[in-house]
Image (spheres, grey):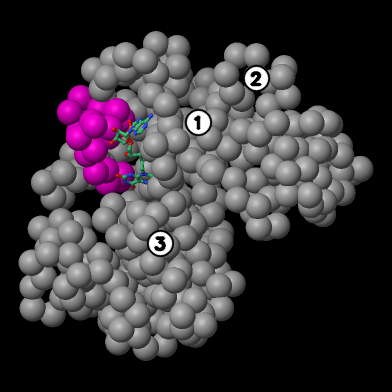
Amino acid sequence: MDITHLDKWHSGRWNLECVDIESETHDVKTFHFRVRPGMDGDAPLCLHRPGQFVTLRLRHGEKLVPRSYTISSSPSRPHLMTMTIKRDPRGLVSRYMHDVLKVGDVLPVSGPGGHFDLISTTPRKSIVMLSGGSGITPVMSMLRYLHDTRAHDYDVTFLHSARTPADIIFRRELELIAERSGTRLGFICQNDAEDGMDQGFLTREILERRAPDILNSTVLTCGPEPYMNAVKGILAELGFDMAHYHQESFGDPAERENPEGATPESLTLDRVAEPEHIHHDAEHPAPPPESDVTEITFTVSDLTVPYKPGQTILEVATAAGIAIATNCQMGLCGTCKAHCLSGTVAMDDTEGLEPGEEEAGMVLTCCGRPKGPIQIEL
Ligand SMILES: Cc1cc2nc3c(=O)[nH]c(=O)nc-3n(C[C@H](O)[C@H](O)[C@H](O)COP(=O)(O)OP(=O)(O)OC[C@H]3O[C@@H](n4cnc5c(N)ncnc54)[C@H](O)[C@@H]3O)c2cc1C
């Protein structure tokens, strides 16, 4: 898969102008954005790896309330990007997007980021995509990309679970893609399944019937935590090699504390920088790795793990099987912070830390790279 052109949209901060809002289902809307022209001279293209996300920069007073949303569009259509967002009736930012944002507004974002994408996961020739609810968004970006670029060398099966047929996001487009590309498409509805759909939850029987080559496939999964746990359970029963399994979690909102008094109406857009002040990560590269960093010690896990220059603490921990809760993965939300007991860590961003936390030794593991040997309380 040729991806060289996908590096043009450096990760950084962007201003997205909302140019259209479309209803997908009763509680899901797709927001269409154009990157405002002027940066780097030309109108920039929206290039990302299919499956990546951006993090919205909204504030309540001074406090950033970052939320990440997958780019549901494909980089093969680079003049517009979309986010497809489910309205949580008690949620802060999804209600802002549905109820407050309007065409013409300019939304500041950071990104794109994330490694749950068609390129980083280096899929096998057979790909099985499994999604539940709004977890369809990264998979949709991948399917659109595969279809647009006529990537016929991939054999794709896509199974999507929804509450009812009316909750299936992108249904008509998916059916069209399946018809034209040969992608095997299956819907599993908890209630009111139509002819040709499965009723209930995804089971081993459904998976084996709809994706008979599952054991030779790369499996890409995104959905609610219980859904992904069920998928992993089925794959374990089948003896699937989990080296070929990748998933994206949309995070646990229960772990999140919204600022007191915040409502969708109280949110403001982060300062919209003038084009010349917008930074690209290319101008702020990761700090050069120090040559004497060779390992990180995780004190709670009682593990000392080799360190490759340039890696984040989160990447090293994940590879070592140490689970760290994450959300924005860009140093904005603070979900992944941990206490560094000794040594120095350089962070790309410190927005996710509360005042005083950096001085107290807290570090953001998603964007923190050691500047020497460190011990971290994880
Ligand atoms: C990488 C990534 C990609 C994502 N992509 C998408 C996408 O494409 N589309 C999409 O729709 N979503 C996506 N999400 C989820 C999204 O980021 C938000 O989590 C989601 O929209 C809810 O945010 P909110 O501000 O509306 O709700 P929040 O204000 O965060 O609240 C969410 C729920 O938690 C409850 N809650 C809030 N605070 C607490 C608390 N302290 N204790 C207990 N419960 C509480 C609320 O009542 C509400 O029901 C993605 C997430 C990640 C991490």
Circle 2 residue: 357
Q: Quadrant of residue 364?
A: top right
Q: For residue 272, what is the image quadrant?
A: top left
Pointer 3 residue Cβ closer than 8 Å to ligand 1 = no
- Tell me the residue at 36%/74% (across/down): 150
Badge 2 marks a residue whose secondary structure is loop
Q: Amino acid at mark 2?
A: Glu
Residue 300 pos. (x, y %): 73, 44
Indicate which disc residue 173 carries: none
> Which corner quadrant of the figure contains ligand 1?
top left
**Helix or strand or loop: what does disc 1 sit on?**
loop
Tell which residue pokes out farthest to the right in this image: 292
Q: Which residue is mark 1?
A: 333
Q: Is residue 274 magenta?
A: no
x and y percent of residue 278 in the render? 51, 25
Disc 1 marks a residue whose amino acid type is Cys
Residue placed farthest to the top in the image? 61
Q: Is residue 350 above or below residue 371?
A: above
Q: What's the magenta region?
A: 82-103
The type of residue carrying mark 3 is Met
Tag of residue 228 = 3
Few, some or many residues within 10 Å of mark 2 (<14, 14–19, 20+): some
